[in-house]
Amino acid sequence: MARRGKKRALVAIGHKILLAAYHILKTGQKYVDLGGDYLAKRQQDRQVQSALTKLQSLGYLVALEKK
């Protein structure tokens, strides 16, 4: 909403809900909530992958370890 405005944000959310309903009705599967932090986690995964790609393109050998 901050970048595009309130009306566009509402239309985007409506679009997401409509697509979810369509796929639920089409496939007959039950709705599964991905969780409140799904998008944040997905963004974090993208940032990690982007950093890895950048370091590898600079010639570094990278190994990841979780805390």
Image: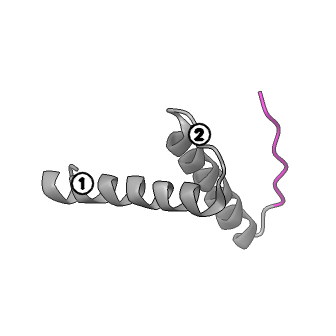
* Residue sticking out furthest to the bottom: 57
Sequence-wise first label, 2 or 1? 1
x, y percent for residue 13: 32, 52
Q: Is residue 62 magenta?
A: yes
| For residue 38, side relative to residue 45 (left or right) | left
| Element carrying mark 1 | helix
C-beta proximity under 8 Å, tags 2 and 1: no
Q: Amino acid at mark 1?
A: Ala
- Camera-nearest residue between 58 and 44: 44
| For residue 37, side relative to residue 53 (left or right) | left
Q: Which residues are magenta?
A: 61-67
Q: Amino acid at mark 2?
A: Leu
Q: Give the quarter of the figure containing the C terminus.
A: top right
Q: Report crowding for label 2: few under 14, some 14 to 19, many 20 or more residues within 10 A (C-alpha).
A: few
Q: Residue 35 falls in which quadrant of the image?
A: top right
Q: What residue is at 65 percent from the left and 65 percent from the top?
A: 54
- Camera-nearest residue between 32 and 56: 32
- The reply to whether residue 5 is visible in this rendering is no
State the scheme by which the image is colored.
one colour
The residue that disc 1 covers is 9
Q: What residue is at 81 percent from the left and 45 percent from the top?
A: 64
CA gap, disc 2 to disc 1?
20 Å
x, y percent for residue 14: 31, 55
Q: What residue is at 39 percent from the left and 58 percent from the top?
A: 18
- The reply to whether residue 9 is visible in this rendering is yes
Q: Is residue 19 above or below residue 64?
A: below
The residue that disc 2 covers is 34
x, y percent for residue 44: 58, 45
Q: Report crowding for label 1: few under 14, some 14 to 19, many 20 or more residues within 10 A (C-alpha).
A: some
- Camera-nearest residue between 21 and 42: 21
Q: Residue 46 falls in which quadrant of the image?
A: bottom right
